[in-house]
Image: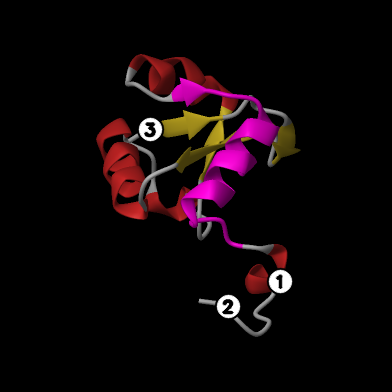
Amino acid sequence: MTVLIDPPLWPAHGRVWGHLVSDTSLDELHAFAAAAGIPSRGFDRDHYDVPAERYESLLEQGAVLVDSRELVRRLRASGLRVTAAQRRGRAGAP
């Protein structure tokens, strides 16, 4: 049971963002995000987008920092990864 976070590298809306995921379950991810005060609007099907200024507190609360490749690898291995095709609504989308 691990909640992972990758470095904030993606600029948008005047901030820099990264991703928060679980390698176990979405329930775990949602519970962690709620306890950390991350708004539900930050959830995007398999991850939460989190701004750089939240990183220190998320690490203190138990998120494990990994690079982006490791985050995606672990998300895929968990079976929780939502593919680009699924995001666009192609066949197989949840």
Task: Please state which amino acid type lies under the numbered disc 3.
Answer: Thr
Q: Using a 10 Å C-alpha cutoff, classify the residue at mark 2 as few (fewer than 14 neighbours), some (14 to 19) or many (20 or more).
A: few
* Residue 53, x across and y down, in percent: 53, 21
Residue 86 located left or right of residue 40: right
For the N terminus, the quadrant is top left
Q: Residue at x 58, y 61 (%)?
A: 82
> Would residue 16 be seen by someone viewing this image from the given angle?
no
Q: Nearer the viewer, residue 11 or 59?
A: 59
Label 2 or label 1, whichever comes before in sequence order: 1
For the residue labelled by badge 3, is the local secondary structure a helix, a strand or a loop?
loop
Residue found at x 37% / y 45%: 24
From the viewer's perspective, is residue 37 above or below residue 64?
below
- Residue 15: image quadrant is top right
Q: Which residue is mark 3?
A: 2
**Badge 1 amino acid:** Ala
Residue corresponding to mark 1? 85
Q: Quick check: 24 above or below 53?
A: below
Q: Is residue 78 on the magenta stretch?
A: yes
Q: Secondary structure at mark 1?
A: helix
Circles 2 and 1: CB atoms closer than 8 Å = yes
In space, the residues marked 2 and 1 are separated at their CA atoms by 7 Å
Query: Is 16 on the left or on the right of 48, as rendered?
Result: right
Say what amino acid the circle numbered 2 marks: Ala
- Residue tagged 2: 93
Colour logic: secondary structure
Res 64 seen here: yes
Instruction: In this rendered view, identify the residue nearer to me: 23 or 36.
Output: 23
**Residue numbers of the magenta segment:** 64-82
| Residue lying farthest to the front in this orientation | 77
